[in-house]
Image (cartoon, rainbow, N blue to C red):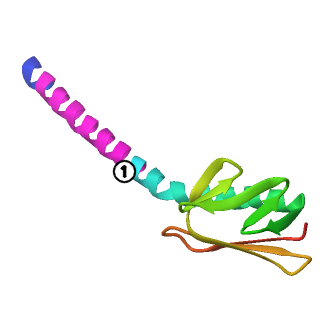
Amino acid sequence: MTLLEMAISIAMVAFVLELGATALNQISKYARAEAQPARIIDLACDRLRRDLERGGRIHGGDLVAGGVRWRVVEGRLMRGAVRTCHVQSAEWTSDGRTIQVVLQPVGLPRREVRACP
């Protein structure tokens, strides 16, 4: 094998490895994008649960938990003025002791959060 042939072979192997690395990067980006909405709704539910543990009540159509107003505005669940996640619906009910929140995220299974403030 001449030096020129060896250089060409090394260049071809490097090219194939670069293509493989690019493909793996794209696949991992797609996987992260798929997992992100579920992670965001889980984080929102955890935050809602912590807020409810510090006290909560239903005020009109909004939920006041931990001194922060939770509501749905244009399909976004809002915590105060901060958008948390996309939801189709959010319902909160209270039996006097327990507050139950049912969230229906877009394209994900519904989530339930219960707390006794």
The residue carrying mark 1 is 27
Residue 114 screen position, x and y as percent:
80, 72
Quarter of the image for residue 65 reads bottom right
* Image: 95 above or below 103: below
The kind of residue on which mark 1 rests is Ile
Residue 84 screen position, x and y as percent:
62, 53
Residue 40 screen position, x and y as percent:
60, 55
* Image: 99 above or below 37: below
* Image: 76 above or below 14: below
Q: Is residue 86 visible?
A: yes
Residue occupying the point 89% across, 70% down: 116
User: 56 left or right of 39?
Assistant: right
User: 10 left or right of 76?
Assistant: left
Residue occupying the point 56% across, 74% down: 109
Disc 1 crowd rating (10 Å Cα; few below 14, some 14-19, many 20+) is few
Q: Main secondary structure of the magenta part?
A: helix
Q: Is residue 104 visible?
A: no
Count of marks placed on residues = 1
Residue occupying the point 14% across, 22% down: 7
Residue occupying the point 41% across, 48% down: 28
Q: Which residues are magenta?
A: 7-28
Identity of the residue furthest to the bottom in this view? 95
Q: Quadrant of the N terminus?
A: top left
Q: Quadrant of the C terminus?
A: bottom right
